[in-house]
Image: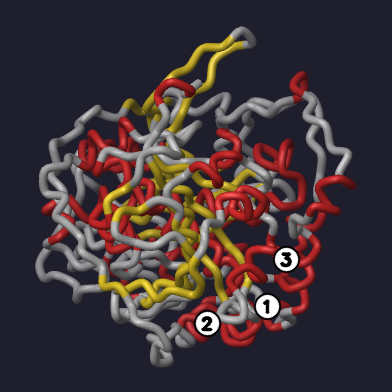
Amino acid sequence: MRNQEIHAALEYHEATKHSERSLRANRHVLDFSNQPLPFKIYRDLEAIPLPRNLAESDWSALDAIAATGSPGSGECIPDLAVLGRILFLSAGITKRKRYPGGEILFRAYPNTGALYHLDLYLVAGDLPGLEAGVYHFGPHDFALHRLRSGDFRSVLFEASGENPDVARAPVVLASASTYWRNAWKYQARSYRHCYWDGGTLHANLLAAAETEALEPRIVMGFADAAVETLLALDPRREAVLTLVPLGRSPKLPPPQAPVSTLRLHTEPLSRVEVDYPAVRSLHEASALTTGEEARAWRSQAMPARAEASSQRETTSLRPVALSHASLDRVIQKRGSTRAFDSTRSLRFEELSTALDRATRGLAADFLVPGASLVDLYLIVHSVDGVAPGAYVYRRRERALEPLREGVFRGPAGRLGLFQELAAEASVNVYSLAPLTPLLKRFGNRGYRAAQLEGGVTGGRLYLAAYALGFGATGLTFLDDEVTEFFSPHAAGKSALFLTALGRADRTRRS
């Protein structure tokens, strides 16, 4: 089983690290005449328009629903209007910005380079307003496009090793990436971005589905080829990332229908597509081949880790309620802050709330309740009541432990790939993980899971920031220097995601 040959993920991670030397050596130039289309557009499939049905879903609904709680009872089947709301808040077009060369259509979730390489698919039984089938969600026309007619949920049930969450779901969302749409700019590093951007999308998706009481759960244990065939993906260019079962039905999926090979025509993405074999190779090396293998992988779900006693006095979080904030409005106004005002601080209650929201637990098949694959480290610049310095977040205690005091705006800017945003923010939050132990437990597929959880954490920080009225942006980083900065505490860990938080500087916003 190639998944257990963990040198593949370790070698990929090492080869795609950023350093000052690697940045200087990289001669890649963006060819805007060959920039890929940010949508997957089928030429011959009928569009089924989705209703636009946003709600004033107040954030208290999320307070009442524990992400790792036990399943509800009874039937909960979403209709087309509910699905339309979830798809819009997950991946719909929320803003348009014109510039001399054209127009950028921004989506509901943060995405590296605003390149939007992710797509969502539905595998559904008969639903109110929607016949059973396999569908692609098109953000460009806010419509579903039917790839297959009939109930194919049993394909996912078998591919996932008879996952009980998949079995009970009247509809399952699947996410996938088209590599070239991101690799055009980020080259081989784009496999990381599959899960960074997948994570921020899933932060929105989970929150929206939770407000509909659909009990969403991320499933990463499945036989890749079976799902990719069902979705008619081209494995040379595309990859399935996750499954998310939604809702509850007392009926199991009907026996598996035959899955034929589809030849569906889509619009070309660009004049020429450049292949980055390292991306495809790692996806293949982290693939599962059978439902039995998926079941065994799921059985390795990470338990909650014990934390060593703190050697220093910690500062407990002081979160505040977000019940006044509408999730729908927060997602629609969310953006990526382009400039921070370094003269204005965050309140500790605001930082506390963002951290609390980001770390309430992730409902996923690779985690038992209360567990996590990532650790959070912070560089605090200007937070009222917190001394500037480096900190680690103690998840179980919900407290900050100081590692060293000091003003680190200069080092933070360097760590954030020499960007002023990291230097001028009030605080930078880094997700790190001990990759080697995780890979020994999960195989190469653990790399996917860790990167995804880092992205979900970043996406949740975004949502909390905009709900509280301040700004956020995701940044890339100098990999090894991040670990070195937080060592010896972070020794042996790898940086996965960086989110900068602070007050937006409206005078310099572009």
Contact (CB < 8 A) between labels 1 and 2? yes
Give the tally of numbered discs.
3
How many residues crowd around disc 2 within 10 Å: few (fewer than 14), some, or many (20 or more)?
A: many
Mark 3 in CB contact with mark 1 (< 8 angstroms): no
C-alpha separation, residue under disc 2 versus residue under disc 3: 21 Å
Q: Residue at x 55, y 25 (%)?
A: 44
Q: Which mark is residue 70?
A: none
Sequence-wise, the earlier of marks 3 and 1 is 1
Kindly identify the amino acid type of the residue bearing the numbered disc 2: Trp
224 vs 4: above or below: above
Whole-number angstrom distance, CA of label 1 to CA of label 2? 10 Å
- Looking at the image, can residue 123 be seen? no
Badge nearest the viewer, 2 or 3: 3
Q: For mark 1, what is the residue? A: 3
| Residue 259 image offset from top left, x and y in percent | 53, 56
- Provide the secondary structure element on which disc 3 rests: helix
Give the x, y percent position of residue 431: 51, 64
Residue positioned 52% across, 78% down in the render: 294
* Three-letter amino acid code of the residue under disc 1: Asn
70 lies above or below 320: below
Question: In this image, 73 relative to 293: left or right?
Answer: left
Q: Residue furthest top?
A: 100
Amino acid identity at mark 3: His
Quadrant for the N terminus, please.
Answer: bottom right
Residue 470, by quadrant, is top left
Nearer to me, 65 or 417:
417
For mark 3, what is the residue?
Answer: 13
